[in-house]
Amino acid sequence: MAQWREAVREESFSRTTTFRHRRKSIAIFRLEDGLFAIDNVCSHEYSELSEGMVVGGDVYCPKHGSRFDIRTGAVKDYPATRPVKTYEVKVEDGVVYVKV
Ligand code: FES
């Protein structure tokens, strides 16, 4: 069952950061309407989405350019065809928590 895990201090990053839980790497993005967390690893091949370019609410995979919706994890451009997992995020007392 998923539980809230302390990830990072909110003031420790501006646009993007990562958080590891067990073997999973999760990317946390700051968008205009809040913080969002998705799997950091692209669903196509191995590449870290936290290294990708963010445009609006989308992130472009730095390896082959697939585009993912950061809020929903949906894939919007090939070559990836599968979405990436999303995670709930909350901030309490300046600490970012991710439900994993
Ligand atoms: S590894 Fe991300 S699009 Fe290929």
Image: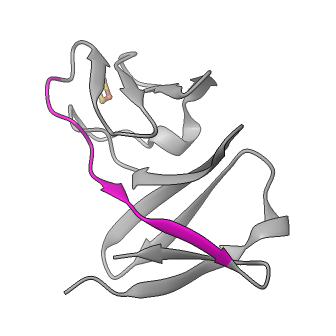
17 sits left or right of 2 in the view: right
Q: Quadrant of residue 13?
A: bottom right
> Where does residue 96 sit, x and y in percent of width and height?
64, 74
Residue name at image x 57 percent, y 71 percent: 90
Q: Is residue 39 above or below residue 7?
A: above
| Residue 87 lies in the magenta-colored region | yes
* Residue stretch in magenta: 81-91
Q: Is residue 53 above or below residue 27?
A: above
Residue name at image x 30 percent, y 75 percent: 23
Residue name at image x 27 percent, y 43 percent: 84
> Where does residue 55 sit, x and y in percent of width and height?
61, 19
Q: Is residue 21 above or below residue 53?
A: below
Residue name at image x 34 percent, y 19 percent: 66
> Quadrant location of the C terminus?
bottom left
> Where does residue 61 sit, x and y in percent of width and height?
43, 27
> Where does residue 9 sit, x and y in percent of width and height?
75, 76
80 sits left or right of 12 in the view: left
Query: Which residue of the protein is positioned furthest toward the left in this rendering?
Result: 81
| Residue 61 lies in the magenta-colored region | no
Residues 60 and 58: in front is 58
Q: Give the mark count.
A: 0
Query: Which residue of the protein is positioned furthest toward the front in this rendering?
Result: 33
> Quadrant location of the N terminus?
bottom left
Q: Quadrant of residue 22?
A: bottom left
Q: Quadrant of ligand 1?
A: top left
Q: Is residue 62 above or below residue 27?
A: above
Chosen colour scheme: one colour
